[in-house]
């Protein structure tokens, strides 16, 4: 299938380490101190629909990770920090575009906002994540009365650092989207996605 080949070629270029150089040139701005990760990811997702073929997507997105552990640890009771965190605690902003390949050729776009906790073990960083977001899809379904939807999502995976500041990541993510009863019907759609990406850390 042609669209799959395009995504595969794109992913191969990313994995060959062209991504960090390109991102540094593209983002010529003063990096905020809290910004610790810039990356890209791709993957596939699938959901069951009642009256149509499965909802299937191929997506491409960007990832911006902000270290919020210092902010959380500033919350104090007296002289003691309210919460001491071992490992990493990041706030992720993930804008993305996705081609809908089934039940009809369409597309969706949106932004995910997630909290991710991870603990690095040698070259591996396993993590769990949970969050929300907003999306729009051109695909009409009987499950949703609107094309604008809210997301609730979560999952887990791991990073593998092939260089000190660069890592490839693999993850599973569950994403439920619905319109929060703005308009009927609103039964929601549950997408199971598998993602792969590459990131530069600062």
Image: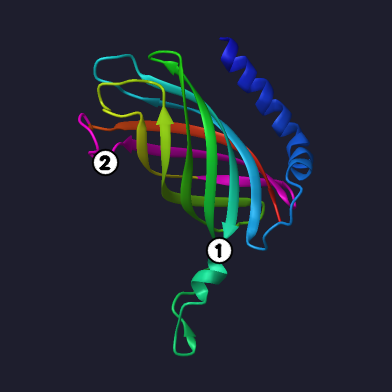
Residue 86, percent from left and from top: 53, 68
Which residue is rendered at x = 73% and y = 37% of the image? 19
Which residue is rendered at x = 67% and y = 25% of the image? 10
122 vs 47, left or right, is right
Residue 155, percent from left and from top: 43, 44
Picture quadrant of residue 105: top left
Which residue is rendered at x = 73% and y = 41% of the image? 23
111 vs 35, left or right, is left
How far apart marks 2 and 1 lie (CA) works out to 34 Å
Residue 199, percent from left and from top: 66, 44
Picture quadrant of residue 12: top right
Of all residues, the one furthest to the top in this rendering is: 1
Residue position for label 2: 180
Which of the two discs, 2 and 1, sits closer to the camera? Answer: 2
**For this rendering, which residue is in front, 175 or 94?**
94
**For this rendering, which residue is in front, 195 or 115?**
115
Magenta-highlighted stretch: main secondary structure? strand
Identify the magenta region: 157-185
Asked if disc 2 and disc 1 are in contact, CB closer than 8 Å, the reply is no
Mark 2 or mark 1: which comes first in sequence?
1
Of all residues, the one furthest to the bottom in this rendering is: 78
Residue position for label 1: 87
């Amino acid at each position: 299938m042609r669209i799959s080949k395009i995504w595969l070629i794109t992913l191969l270029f990313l994995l060959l380490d062209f991504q960090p150089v390109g991102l540094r040139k593209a983002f010529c701005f003063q990096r905020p101190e809290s910004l610790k990760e810039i990356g890209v990811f791709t993957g596939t997702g699938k959901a069951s629909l009642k009256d149509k073929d499965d909802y299937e997507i191929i997506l491409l997105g960007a990832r911006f990770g902000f270290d919020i552990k210092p902010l959380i640890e500033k919350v104090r009771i007296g002289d003691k920090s309210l919460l001491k965190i071992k490992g990493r605690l990041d706030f992720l902003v993930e804008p993305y575009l996705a081609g809908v390949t089934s039940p009809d050729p369409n597309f969706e776009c949106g932004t995910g906002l997630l909290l991710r906790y991870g603990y690095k073990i040698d070259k591996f960083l396993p993590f769990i994540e949970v969050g929300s977001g907003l999306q729009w899809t051109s695909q009409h379904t009987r499950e949703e009365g609107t094309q604008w939807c809210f997301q609730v999502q979560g999952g887990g995976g791991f990073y593998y650092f092939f260089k000190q500041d660069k890592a490839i990541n693999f993850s599973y993510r569950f994403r439920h989207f619905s319109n929060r009863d703005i308009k009927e019907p609103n039964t929601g759609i549950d997408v199971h996605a598998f993602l792969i990406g590459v990131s530069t850390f600062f």
